[in-house]
Amino acid sequence: MSYPSENMQKPGKKNALYAQSGGVTAVINASAAGVIDACRRHRSRIGKLYAGRDGIVGALTEDLIDISKENPATLRGLRHTPAGAFGSARFKLKGIEQNRAEYERLIEVFRAHDIGYFFYNGGGDSMDTALKLSQIGSELGYPLVCVGVPKTVDNDLPLTDCCPGFGSVAKYVAVSTREAALDVASMARTSTKVFVLEVMGRHAGWIAAAGGLAGRKAGEPPHVILFPEIAFDQAHFLARVQQCVTDYGYCVIVVSEGTHDADGRFLADAGTRDAFGHTQLGGVGPLIANMVREHLGYKYHWAVADYLQRAARHIASKTDVAQAYAVGKAAVEFALAGENAVMAAIVRKSSRPYRWAVKAVPLAQVANVERKMPRDYITPDGFGITAACRRYLAPLIAGEDYPPYRDGLPDYVRIKGARVRRKLATGWKL
Ligand code: F6P
C-alpha cells in the first residue's frame, strides 16, 4: 500500500479528511481501513488522505495526521485493531448560529489543506456535525463533500439495519452472559444465586437485548433483562428474581446502563455530563445486585462490562467487521459519485441467510434521531426478547474474525501519527 507523495499530486485533485468521533468501538478502525483503501484505489481522483488527531478537535486545531506516512502493515492492521487509532473526541459543535466561528475555522483549515472530502465516523451527534459542515461549506463558497460513516455500539442510528460496532458488543455480551451463567449454575446450590451483568446503551436496549441471545430455550439464562424502553418497577422485578431462583435455583440478570424509573430518572445517574450534555452512566449493576440482596437476601456477583465490551476485538463479530469496512469504503465511493450530506447505511435484504448492501441516506434524516427497540422485540412481561428480536439480532453476531496473536496476546497496531505541516498562522483555543 503506498500513496503518491505531496509533490506528485495532480493539480486540482482535492484532499480528504477522515475523523473518528464519540465512543470508540472494536471495529471503528475497520471503517478507517475501508476509507483508506478506497481513497488509495481512487488516487487518480483523491489527493492526500489526512486524519484528524482526536477527531474534529484535530481539524479545529490544525492537528492533522498524514496517513501516507504510515507503514503499510500498520494500515492493514487497522482492520483487526480495536479503539480509535487516530484518536476520537466527544466534542459537540454548537448550532451554526450559536458558534459560527467554529464552523468558519473548520472551513479555514479545510481550505488551507485543500480538503474537498470529509468522512466523519460517528453516531447521531456526529452526523449532525457533518450535515452542518456541508451546509456552511456551500454558504461560504467552499464546496465540501461530507459523508457520514456510521458507528455506535448503542445501535441507535435510524435508517440503517444496524450500526457498526454494535454486532461485536452484542457478541461479547451474549458470549459473556452464556459463560457467566454456566459459572453461576454450577455453584448456585451452596453459593451465588444471582449474577448481574451491566451493559452499555444509554437510551436504547439493543445491547441488553443481545444478552438474550445467550439462552436458546425458555428458562435458559439470562432470566431477566432490564431495558431502557421499559420503566423499572422494583416490586415486579424482585418478584421475578425470586421466582427464577425458586424455579431454576439461580437468576442471571442483564441490565442496561440506561434503565430508568417511570419518571425517566436513570437508576444510575453518576451526576456528571459529557460535552454533548449526556449523563455519565454506570453503576446500575451493583445497585440492582444490592437491591436483590437487601430484599431477598441472595448471595450475588455483579460485573460491569463497561469498556471491555466495546474494546473486545478478540471476539468481534465477523459480520460487524465486514460491515464496518464496507461503510468506510462506500463512503468514499458515494462521495466520488457526487453524493453529499449522506451517510453510508446498511440495508438488510434478508435475515436467513443474512444478506445486506450499503446505500446512501440523507444526513438530514439521520442526525439527532435515536432508534430504540420496538415494543414487539420485548416480551409482554418486559423482561425478555421475542423471536422477532432474535431474528433481527442473530445474524449481526455471526462469525468470528480473530486478530492475529503474538506471545499469547492479540497483535494490535499503533499508528505513528506524523503531523501534517501547519499552514495557518493562527492557532485555535478549544
Ligand atoms: O458511544 C456510546 C457509548 O458507548 C455509550 O453506550 C456509553 O454510555 C458511552 O458511550 C460512554 O461514553 P464515554 O466513554 O465518553 O464515557
Image: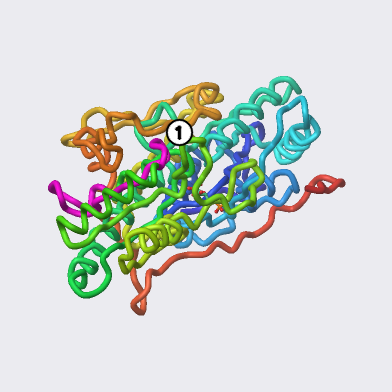
Would you identify the image quadrant in which residue 291 lies? bottom left
Image position of 264 with respect to 409: above or below: above
* Residue farthest toward the left in the current orientation of the protein: 217
**Residue at the spot 66% in from the left edge and 37% down from the top edge:** 115
Q: Nearer the viewer, residue 429 or 68?
A: 429
Question: Is residue 265 found left or right of 297 in the rendered image?
Answer: right
Q: Give the dominant element type of the magenta stretch: helix, strand or loop.
A: loop
Question: Is residue 218 found left or right of 260 in the rendered image?
Answer: left
Q: Position of residue 334 (x, y in %)?
A: 47, 28
Image position of 333 with respect to 257: above or below: above
The span shown in magenta is 212-232
Can you identify the residue that label 1 sits on?
157
Secondary structure type for disc 1: loop
**Residue at the spot 43% in from the left edge and 55% down from the top edge:** 310
**Residue at the spot 38% in from the left edge and 51% down from the top edge:** 255
Q: Nearer the viewer, residue 206 or 359?
A: 206
Image position of 376 with respect to 88: above or below: above
| Amino acid bearing label 1 | Leu
Q: Position of residue 130 (x, y in %)?
A: 60, 32
Q: Position of residue 128 (x, y in %)?
A: 59, 30
* Residue farthest toward the right in the current orientation of the protein: 425
How many other residues sit within 10 Å of disc 1, few (<14), some (14-19) or many (≥20)?
many
Magenta-drawn stretch contains 51: no
Residue 77 appears in view? no
Question: Is residue 7 found left or right of 1 in the rendered image?
Answer: right
Magenta-drawn stretch contains 223: yes
Q: Nearer the viewer, residue 321 or 367?
A: 367
Residue 136 appears in view? yes
